[in-house]
Amino acid sequence: MSVTWGLIAVAQSAAPPCKSCAEWNQPQAPFRIFGNTYYVGPHGLSSILITSDAGHILIDGGLPESAPQIEANVRSLGFRIEDVKLILNSHVHFDHAGGIAELQRISGAQVFASKWSASVMKKGGVGRADPQYGVLAGIAPVKHVRELRDGQTFRVGEAVITAHLTPGHTPGGTSWTWRSCEGSICREIVFADSITPISADGFKFTKSREYPNAVEDFEKSFSFLEAAPCDVLITTHPEASGLWDRIEAREHGVTPDPMMDSSACRHLAEQGRSQLRERIAEERKE
Ligand SMILES: [Zn+2]
Protein backbone atom coordinates (compact mmCIF):
# COMPACT_ATOMS: atom_id res chain seq x y z
CA MET A 1 0.00 0.00 0.00
CA SER A 2 2.60 2.51 1.11
CA VAL A 3 4.89 1.57 -1.80
CA THR A 4 2.13 2.18 -4.36
CA TRP A 5 1.25 5.48 -2.75
CA GLY A 6 4.92 6.47 -2.73
CA LEU A 7 5.25 5.86 -6.48
CA ILE A 8 2.10 7.80 -7.29
CA ALA A 9 3.31 10.69 -5.15
CA VAL A 10 6.71 10.71 -6.90
CA ALA A 11 5.12 10.47 -10.34
CA GLN A 12 2.80 13.38 -9.60
CA SER A 13 5.29 15.67 -7.97
CA ALA A 14 8.48 15.08 -9.96
CA ALA A 15 7.51 14.04 -13.49
CA PRO A 16 6.11 16.64 -15.88
CA PRO A 17 3.14 15.64 -18.05
CA CYS A 18 4.35 13.61 -21.03
CA LYS A 19 4.07 15.88 -24.07
CA SER A 20 5.12 13.23 -26.59
CA CYS A 21 3.13 10.28 -25.22
CA ALA A 22 -0.05 10.71 -27.31
CA GLU A 23 2.08 11.02 -30.45
CA TRP A 24 4.26 8.03 -29.53
CA ASN A 25 1.17 5.94 -28.85
CA GLN A 26 -0.48 6.60 -32.24
CA PRO A 27 -1.82 3.29 -33.60
CA GLN A 28 0.35 1.42 -36.08
CA ALA A 29 -0.71 -1.62 -38.09
CA PRO A 30 1.80 -4.40 -37.32
CA PHE A 31 4.01 -5.66 -40.15
CA ARG A 32 6.77 -8.10 -40.95
CA ILE A 33 10.29 -6.65 -40.89
CA PHE A 34 11.97 -9.81 -42.13
CA GLY A 35 11.35 -13.54 -41.70
CA ASN A 36 10.01 -14.21 -38.21
CA THR A 37 10.62 -10.59 -37.03
CA TYR A 38 7.60 -8.28 -36.76
CA TYR A 39 6.94 -4.69 -35.64
CA VAL A 40 4.06 -4.74 -33.11
CA GLY A 41 4.53 -1.41 -31.29
CA PRO A 42 2.59 1.83 -31.58
CA HIS A 43 3.83 4.23 -34.28
CA GLY A 44 6.39 6.03 -32.12
CA LEU A 45 7.83 3.27 -29.91
CA SER A 46 9.30 0.06 -31.25
CA SER A 47 8.10 -3.23 -29.90
CA ILE A 48 9.39 -6.29 -31.72
CA LEU A 49 7.97 -9.80 -31.91
CA ILE A 50 10.21 -12.72 -32.91
CA THR A 51 8.16 -15.82 -33.52
CA SER A 52 8.79 -19.56 -33.43
CA ASP A 53 6.68 -22.72 -33.44
CA ALA A 54 7.46 -23.18 -29.75
CA GLY A 55 6.56 -19.65 -28.61
CA HIS A 56 7.64 -16.06 -29.14
CA ILE A 57 9.98 -13.36 -27.88
CA LEU A 58 8.82 -9.77 -27.33
CA ILE A 59 11.24 -6.86 -26.98
CA ASP A 60 9.97 -3.72 -25.22
CA GLY A 61 6.48 -2.87 -24.02
CA GLY A 62 6.07 0.81 -24.89
CA LEU A 63 4.10 3.02 -22.50
CA PRO A 64 1.67 1.60 -19.93
CA GLU A 65 -1.11 2.60 -22.32
CA SER A 66 0.62 0.83 -25.25
CA ALA A 67 0.07 -2.67 -23.80
CA PRO A 68 -3.47 -3.22 -25.17
CA GLN A 69 -2.31 -2.04 -28.61
CA ILE A 70 0.71 -4.37 -28.60
CA GLU A 71 -1.52 -7.28 -27.56
CA ALA A 72 -4.02 -6.47 -30.34
CA ASN A 73 -1.19 -6.16 -32.90
CA VAL A 74 0.21 -9.57 -31.94
CA ARG A 75 -3.27 -11.11 -32.33
CA SER A 76 -3.97 -9.39 -35.64
CA LEU A 77 -0.80 -10.99 -37.06
CA GLY A 78 -2.35 -14.35 -36.12
CA PHE A 79 -0.23 -15.03 -33.04
CA ARG A 80 -1.33 -15.48 -29.43
CA ILE A 81 -0.04 -13.17 -26.70
CA GLU A 82 -0.18 -16.22 -24.39
CA ASP A 83 2.52 -17.80 -26.59
CA VAL A 84 5.00 -15.02 -25.77
CA LYS A 85 7.44 -16.90 -23.54
CA LEU A 86 10.07 -14.22 -23.04
CA ILE A 87 9.84 -10.44 -22.62
CA LEU A 88 13.07 -8.43 -22.98
CA ASN A 89 13.84 -4.73 -22.68
CA SER A 90 16.13 -2.07 -24.12
CA HIS A 91 16.13 0.31 -21.16
CA VAL A 92 13.96 0.70 -18.15
CA HIS A 93 12.23 4.03 -18.94
CA PHE A 94 8.45 4.44 -18.90
CA ASP A 95 8.30 4.70 -22.72
CA HIS A 96 9.96 1.31 -23.39
CA ALA A 97 9.33 -0.63 -20.16
CA GLY A 98 6.07 1.01 -19.02
CA GLY A 99 3.88 -1.66 -20.61
CA ILE A 100 5.96 -4.67 -19.52
CA ALA A 101 4.16 -5.37 -16.21
CA GLU A 102 0.81 -5.61 -18.00
CA LEU A 103 2.19 -7.58 -20.97
CA GLN A 104 3.77 -10.04 -18.56
CA ARG A 105 0.46 -10.37 -16.69
CA ILE A 106 -1.53 -11.20 -19.81
CA SER A 107 1.11 -13.45 -21.41
CA GLY A 108 2.64 -15.19 -18.39
CA ALA A 109 6.06 -14.68 -20.05
CA GLN A 110 9.36 -14.62 -18.23
CA VAL A 111 11.06 -11.24 -18.03
CA PHE A 112 14.86 -11.04 -18.19
CA ALA A 113 16.80 -7.78 -17.75
CA SER A 114 20.33 -6.58 -17.02
CA LYS A 115 21.27 -6.46 -13.34
CA TRP A 116 20.68 -2.70 -13.07
CA SER A 117 17.44 -2.72 -15.10
CA ALA A 118 16.15 -5.72 -13.13
CA SER A 119 16.69 -3.85 -9.85
CA VAL A 120 14.60 -0.92 -11.14
CA MET A 121 11.89 -3.21 -12.55
CA LYS A 122 11.53 -5.07 -9.26
CA LYS A 123 10.97 -1.85 -7.29
CA GLY A 124 9.27 0.18 -10.01
CA GLY A 125 9.93 3.92 -10.34
CA VAL A 126 13.18 5.34 -11.77
CA GLY A 127 16.70 4.20 -10.80
CA ARG A 128 18.69 6.62 -8.65
CA ALA A 129 21.72 6.45 -11.01
CA ASP A 130 19.58 7.23 -14.05
CA PRO A 131 20.79 10.43 -15.75
CA GLN A 132 17.11 11.45 -16.06
CA TYR A 133 16.29 10.70 -12.41
CA GLY A 134 13.80 13.29 -11.13
CA VAL A 135 12.28 14.29 -14.47
CA LEU A 136 10.82 10.97 -15.67
CA ALA A 137 7.65 9.13 -14.73
CA GLY A 138 8.40 5.83 -13.02
CA ILE A 139 7.39 2.39 -14.24
CA ALA A 140 5.02 -0.04 -12.56
CA PRO A 141 6.92 -2.81 -10.72
CA VAL A 142 7.42 -6.02 -12.71
CA LYS A 143 7.14 -9.39 -10.95
CA HIS A 144 9.73 -12.21 -11.02
CA VAL A 145 12.32 -10.39 -13.12
CA ARG A 146 15.42 -12.47 -13.75
CA GLU A 147 18.90 -11.05 -14.30
CA LEU A 148 20.80 -11.64 -17.52
CA ARG A 149 24.50 -11.29 -18.19
CA ASP A 150 26.34 -9.63 -21.05
CA GLY A 151 26.48 -11.96 -24.06
CA GLN A 152 23.81 -14.29 -22.72
CA THR A 153 21.83 -16.15 -25.37
CA PHE A 154 18.14 -17.01 -25.04
CA ARG A 155 16.32 -19.65 -27.04
CA VAL A 156 12.58 -20.05 -27.64
CA GLY A 157 12.12 -22.85 -30.18
CA GLU A 158 14.23 -21.93 -33.22
CA ALA A 159 14.38 -18.23 -32.19
CA VAL A 160 17.76 -17.43 -30.64
CA ILE A 161 18.61 -13.96 -29.34
CA THR A 162 21.71 -12.53 -27.66
CA ALA A 163 21.92 -9.74 -25.04
CA HIS A 164 24.61 -7.03 -25.33
CA LEU A 165 24.97 -4.52 -22.51
CA THR A 166 24.96 -1.02 -24.07
CA PRO A 167 24.82 1.35 -21.07
CA GLY A 168 25.13 5.14 -20.98
CA HIS A 169 21.60 6.41 -21.70
CA THR A 170 20.83 4.36 -18.57
CA PRO A 171 23.29 2.24 -16.56
CA GLY A 172 21.38 -0.94 -17.55
CA GLY A 173 20.81 -0.39 -21.28
CA THR A 174 20.76 -3.53 -23.40
CA SER A 175 20.79 -4.13 -27.17
CA TRP A 176 19.73 -7.36 -28.86
CA THR A 177 20.93 -9.34 -31.87
CA TRP A 178 19.40 -12.27 -33.71
CA ARG A 179 19.18 -13.82 -37.17
CA SER A 180 15.96 -14.07 -39.15
CA CYS A 181 15.62 -16.07 -42.36
CA GLU A 182 13.29 -16.24 -45.35
CA GLY A 183 14.08 -19.53 -47.00
CA SER A 184 17.83 -19.64 -47.49
CA ILE A 185 18.27 -15.86 -47.10
CA CYS A 186 19.20 -14.84 -43.57
CA ARG A 187 19.76 -11.40 -42.08
CA GLU A 188 21.50 -10.25 -38.93
CA ILE A 189 19.12 -7.99 -37.04
CA VAL A 190 20.18 -5.51 -34.35
CA PHE A 191 17.73 -3.92 -31.94
CA ALA A 192 19.83 -1.03 -30.67
CA ASP A 193 19.07 0.60 -27.35
CA SER A 194 18.99 4.43 -27.09
CA ILE A 195 22.50 5.92 -26.94
CA THR A 196 21.63 9.59 -26.41
CA PRO A 197 23.25 11.55 -23.54
CA ILE A 198 20.05 13.09 -22.16
CA SER A 199 19.78 14.05 -18.50
CA ALA A 200 17.97 15.97 -15.81
CA ASP A 201 19.28 19.53 -15.21
CA GLY A 202 22.42 19.47 -13.12
CA PHE A 203 23.47 15.92 -14.02
CA LYS A 204 26.94 15.59 -15.53
CA PHE A 205 27.97 12.55 -17.55
CA THR A 206 31.59 13.54 -16.85
CA LYS A 207 31.11 13.82 -13.11
CA SER A 208 28.31 11.97 -11.36
CA ARG A 209 28.52 10.38 -7.94
CA GLU A 210 25.53 8.14 -8.76
CA TYR A 211 26.82 7.14 -12.21
CA PRO A 212 30.62 7.62 -12.17
CA ASN A 213 31.46 5.52 -15.27
CA ALA A 214 28.85 6.96 -17.64
CA VAL A 215 31.35 8.07 -20.31
CA GLU A 216 33.19 4.71 -20.39
CA ASP A 217 29.80 3.01 -20.58
CA PHE A 218 28.89 5.01 -23.69
CA GLU A 219 32.24 4.10 -25.27
CA LYS A 220 31.50 0.41 -24.73
CA SER A 221 28.11 0.85 -26.38
CA PHE A 222 29.54 2.67 -29.41
CA SER A 223 32.17 -0.06 -29.83
CA PHE A 224 29.48 -2.72 -29.78
CA LEU A 225 27.50 -0.93 -32.53
CA GLU A 226 30.62 -0.47 -34.65
CA ALA A 227 31.50 -4.16 -34.51
CA ALA A 228 28.10 -5.87 -34.59
CA PRO A 229 27.11 -7.77 -37.75
CA CYS A 230 24.16 -5.59 -38.73
CA ASP A 231 22.07 -6.10 -41.87
CA VAL A 232 18.93 -4.54 -40.41
CA LEU A 233 18.96 -1.91 -37.66
CA ILE A 234 15.91 -1.28 -35.49
CA THR A 235 15.98 1.43 -32.83
CA THR A 236 13.84 1.99 -29.70
CA HIS A 237 12.37 5.10 -31.33
CA PRO A 238 11.77 3.93 -34.92
CA GLU A 239 12.55 7.26 -36.59
CA ALA A 240 16.06 7.23 -35.06
CA SER A 241 16.93 4.66 -37.73
CA GLY A 242 14.62 6.05 -40.44
CA LEU A 243 12.25 3.08 -40.18
CA TRP A 244 9.21 4.81 -41.71
CA ASP A 245 11.17 6.12 -44.70
CA ARG A 246 12.61 2.66 -45.26
CA ILE A 247 9.17 1.03 -45.01
CA GLU A 248 7.70 3.53 -47.46
CA ALA A 249 10.54 2.91 -49.92
CA ARG A 250 10.04 -0.83 -49.55
CA GLU A 251 6.30 -0.45 -50.27
CA HIS A 252 7.23 1.43 -53.45
CA GLY A 253 9.27 -1.55 -54.54
CA VAL A 254 12.70 0.07 -54.13
CA THR A 255 15.51 -2.47 -54.52
CA PRO A 256 17.71 -3.61 -52.92
CA ASP A 257 15.46 -3.92 -49.85
CA PRO A 258 15.67 -0.51 -48.07
CA MET A 259 15.40 -2.30 -44.71
CA MET A 260 18.91 -3.62 -45.41
CA ASP A 261 21.79 -1.28 -44.59
CA SER A 262 24.92 -2.86 -43.26
CA SER A 263 26.38 0.56 -42.39
CA ALA A 264 23.37 1.66 -40.26
CA CYS A 265 24.79 0.48 -36.93
CA ARG A 266 28.13 2.22 -37.58
CA HIS A 267 26.30 5.43 -38.52
CA LEU A 268 24.26 5.28 -35.33
CA ALA A 269 27.47 4.85 -33.33
CA GLU A 270 29.03 7.84 -35.12
CA GLN A 271 25.98 9.96 -34.31
CA GLY A 272 26.13 8.86 -30.68
CA ARG A 273 29.84 9.65 -30.46
CA SER A 274 29.37 13.17 -31.79
CA GLN A 275 26.41 13.87 -29.46
CA LEU A 276 28.47 12.70 -26.49
CA ARG A 277 31.47 14.77 -27.62
CA GLU A 278 29.30 17.90 -27.74
CA ARG A 279 27.78 17.11 -24.39
CA ILE A 280 31.19 16.61 -22.77
CA ALA A 281 32.42 19.92 -24.25
CA GLU A 282 29.39 21.72 -22.77
CA GLU A 283 29.94 20.13 -19.36
CA ARG A 284 33.60 21.23 -19.39
CA LYS A 285 32.60 24.82 -20.14
CA GLU A 286 30.36 25.01 -17.07
ZN1 LIG B 1 15.04 6.57 -22.45
Image (tube, grey):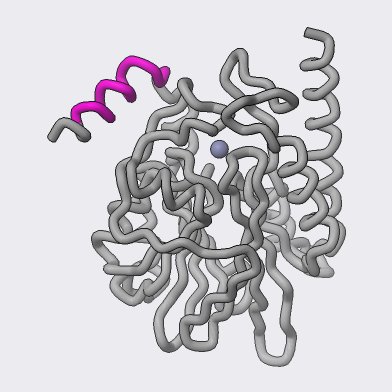
Range of magenta residues: 5-16
Q: Which is nearer the eye, 176 or 122? A: 122
In-image side of 113 versus 143 (left or right): right
Rendered-image quadrant of the N terminus: top left
Q: Residue furthest top?
A: 286
Residue appearing at x 84%, y 62% in the figure: 227
Q: Quadrant of ligand 1?
A: top right
Rendered-image quadrant of the C terminus: top right
Establish if 117 lies above or below 170: below
Residue 84: image location, x then y, percent = 37, 72
Residue 171: image location, x then y, percent = 59, 42
205 part of magenta stretch: no
In-image side of 211 versus 51 (left or right): right
Residue 275: image location, x then y, percent = 80, 31
Residue appearing at x 69%, y 68% in the figure: 189
Establish if 269 lies above or below 258: above
In-image side of 172 versus 168 (left or right): left
Q: Residue furthest bottom?
A: 184
Residue appearing at x 33%, y 43% in the figure: 123
15 part of magenta stretch: yes
Residue 173: image location, x then y, percent = 59, 48
Residue appearing at x 69%, y 42% in the figure: 195
